[in-house]
Image (cartoon, coloured by chain):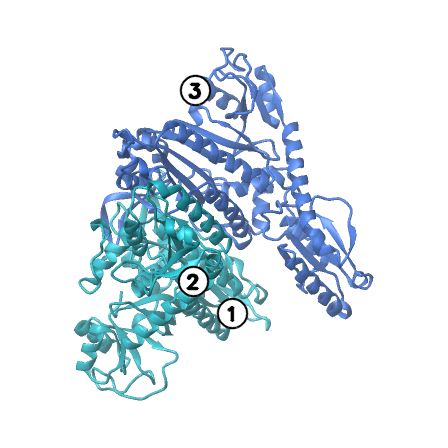
Chain colours: A blue, B cyan
Amino acid sequence: MAKEQGVTPQSQDFSEWYIDVIQKAELVDYGPVRGTMVMRPYGYALWENLQRELDRMIKETGHENAYFPLFIPMSFLQKEAEHVEGFAPELAVVTHAGGEELEEPLAVRPTSETVIGYMWSKWISSWRDLPVLMNQWANVVRWEKRPRPFLRTTEFLWQEGHTAHATREEAEEETRRMLGVYAQLARDYAAIPVWEGMKTEKEKFAGAVYTTTIEAMMRDGKALQAGTSHFLGQNFARAFEITFQDQDLEEKYVWTTSWGLSTRMIGAIIMAHGDDQGLILPPRLAPIQVVVVPIYRKNTREVVLEAARELVREIRAAGVRVHLDDRDQYSPGYKFNEWELKGVPLRIEIGPRDVEAGHAVLKSRLGGEKEFIGLRDLPGLLPERLEGFHRALYERALAFREAGVRRVDDYDAFKAQVERGFAAAFHCGEAVCEKAIQEETKATTRLIPFDFPEEEGVCVRCGRPSAYGKRVLFAKAY
Amino acid sequence: MAKEQGVTPQSQDFSEWYIDVIQKAELVDYGPVRGTMVMRPYGYALWENLQRELDRMIKETGHENAYFPLFIPMSFLQKEAEHVEGFAPELAVVTHAGGEELEEPLAVRPTSETVIGYMWSKWISSWRDLPVLMNQWANVVRWEKRPRPFLRTTEFLWQEGHTAHATREEAEEETRRMLGVYAQLARDYAAIPVWEGMKTEKEKFAGAVYTTTIEAMMRDGKALQAGTSHFLGQNFARAFEITFQDQDLEEKYVWTTSWGLSTRMIGAIIMAHGDDQGLILPPRLAPIQVVVVPIYRKNTREVVLEAARELVREIRAAGVRVHLDDRDQYSPGYKFNEWELKGVPLRIEIGPRDVEAGHAVLKSRLGGEKEFIGLRDLPGLLPERLEGFHRALYERALAFREAGVRRVDDYDAFKAQVERGFAAAFHCGEAVCEKAIQEETKATTRLIPFDFPEEEGVCVRCGRPSAYGKRVLFAKAY
């Protein structure tokens, strides 16, 4: 492998591996302002594919896209007490514009509950206006102390859904429905198994009644929160006077939800699947699903390239995202390494003898033997091979996750377990105890999974009775 | 017509008409910060449709999407002298973030040449890296003194294309190619005829060698610049040291272009087509192409709604964006007015006697008789009717435009002409004279159209020889 293509092995330093792979695979680069990132075309294409699928799901569940302003008056953020407390330390503030100092400083949106609440108070007046089901694709800014591309960046891209309902039940249902959409996106498109569940009071969104979350396990055993859906109760409705006249003619506050999924999900894809050779991309989201690498010398160049081009046309006609790497200046070996680094699921090699024999070589990024497949059959075969790749990738991640989680009932075992993966343990529910665990082990409560069985026990750290009627998942987290 | 549905007639006050129609049709609302706008779902859906078509065209011409940071160090903007002079008065500036004052204030991007130039200087090193063909969809901020929704807002959405080339010729070709894409979008999707041509030196983009533009005529005779494509020469390459080693082994500066089209285009669609009843939307971009309004009383409700639902299913299956307005609380007449206001191209009415007779009524937003069409034939007929609507809308706008432009050779006739439309006149090319015309008539040079014939003459204002070898189009402009 050419030296510039190499990445630090995961076992040696997972963080270094991550930084190597995102830069060398040309997903991102660092922007000039600390904590900002540039999404390069290969990384952005991955985001576009994810965005297309999620946008479709959001619309299929009845939501409409809209766009609200980037700048929010500082006074808006202060209207919901918990909200401002949570976000104030991370705000970027515009104080000057158009050559003058502004009368009121403007926050660059860290999230849009406040400005949307303000608009809704103008738009919503009757039960006939409800539910309001909106979504926006936008950039948001949160000043991060320890930035890391995709995971914590000063500016990131996301979608934020915001809905208003006439009843509590409806809003709670919506909260769960959209968490389900995120879980489906993770499983069916990113090939990542996720737990769905509740955040503890300490870990919830600033301003929510409660937060639900999907959490995934990365290949270093750490957790990544990949999407959250919040039940906001009437907190923002009260702060922004969002009321409606109900069918019983009474004036009532609406019930609201919000839910967001961001470019963090790309970080999850990288760390849930990648290996020492680089990325492994889930085929349904991969910008390039199949790469064709022709193998030739000067005298066989034309024959091989002609066959490769014909093959690529047919593969494209089969609905597969295919790329022909016909660069003369690199050797086939160099190209193999580069496309492995970039995580392309399937590779096709074709040389002069293959052309003569009427076949090509198929190789999977997940390993296994090279296969010789007839050129006529190959294009039609690829869609099912890609589906098989998706399933194998998901199963691999699931097996890894299952091996990485353990039920633990004493604190020493707990400490050992969060060094390598997730610990399923009882907890007393006290914020002080939760904080002590974090200080002593660096692990935090990730979630109280919906599908964990009801079970009684005592807190793994302090021995008081369990607060949640089931175990909680703890892990170190990104 | 219900009072709240009415809009100020265009002839009475075109500006008031515009403000009425964008709000009442629920395209936009004003944001809480002066000069910002909220794009409501109906307005945003129009933008999404436009975005989808333009994004496809941008990709078909070989460009890749990427995403660059919102925040740009102030020092970057100062590296290109004309650029900073042009944009400094409009900047919004972040001075505080994360609870601290920043060492260097950050500009919220007004456009991204500088930050992209900075990144390119890191990424481009060889002729093999060229051309670089990138695009980004983003929000930008320019502090506007006289904001108006879609036309001039403090924050707006756009795409900005940025390309780097090895030769001047290639960059100039690219500049023209992308202007052609904008013209095609305007004609083939927005149904708006546009002139393509050069901006004068005075009107060009700050930092460009020259700017090309598409200009359209609004229904009050004023001009709207709907998209611009800039040849930047080596100005930004020199400012950001973007060099490459060419095949002859020499280190050279790249040649760059940039081109942008924004939510302004929606303003163009509104003002190029709308009438006293409200919007008229071009079918290829309309969020709703066909609305079905069932007409029933209590005892016929079920029969009519069932037939209407079946019809809507079949229309949808024919690939048409259709909406069923089954709201009980509004009368058919109210609904007709509302969908006319919202500019839906075709309306279908269906009542109990229509159901019995097996037909429905089709009505075009462009006027003409109501037609009775058999329910079986109707769905299959709609796609061609929508295409016909598109052509008729374009022809209508073209005829209006042709009636609104005149060749004028004396200054009095010029002054009269720019009160009602466009004036095609000779100009000396002197910035001082150009500015005087603006002060005396409020008209500006819109463009020097590519397809105007070569012609000699003397300046319509000062009598000096013409500078451009052809006439220039002048108009008052948005």
Q: Secondary structure at mark 2?
A: helix
Q: Are marks 1 and 3 on the same chain?
A: no
Q: Amino acid at mark 3?
A: Ala
Q: Which residue is mark 1?
A: B252
Would you place residue A135 above or below residue B178 in this image? above
Q: Position of residue B147 (x, y in %)?
A: 25, 56
Are labels 2 and 3 assigned to the same chain? no
Task: Indicate which label's residue lies in the foreground, 1 or 3.
Answer: 3
Whether callout 1 and callout 2 share a subunit is answered yes
Give the mark toward the camera: 1 or 2.
Answer: 2
User: Is label 2 in contact with label 3 (beta carbons under 8 Å)?
Assistant: no
Identify which amino acid the numbered label 1 is placed on.
Answer: Lys
Camera sees residue B446: yes
Q: Secondary structure at mark 3?
A: helix
Q: Residues within 10 Å of mark 3 (few under 14, many from 20)?
A: few
Q: Is residue A38 above or below residue B214?
A: above
Between B298 and B161, the one nearer to me in the picture: B298
Q: Chain of mark 1?
A: B
Q: Quadrant of residue B152?
A: bottom left
Residue lying at 64% horizontally and 33% vertically, measured from the top left: A398
Q: Which amino acid lies under the numbered mark 2 shown in the image of this protein?
A: Leu
How many angstroms separate mark 1 from mark 2 (CA)? 51 Å
Q: Nearer the viewer, residue B259 or A169?
A: A169
Q: Which residue is mark 3?
A: A431
Name the residue at the bottom extreme: B456
- Judging by the rendered image, the residue that carries numbered circle 2 is B386
Residue B206 appears in view: no
The CA span between labels 1 and 3 is 62 Å
Query: Disc 2 versus disc 3: distance between alpha carbons?
Result: 62 Å
Q: Residue at x 62, y 46 (%)?
A: A281
Check disc 1 and report its element: helix, strand or loop: strand
Q: Position of residue A238 (x, y in %)?
A: 28, 30
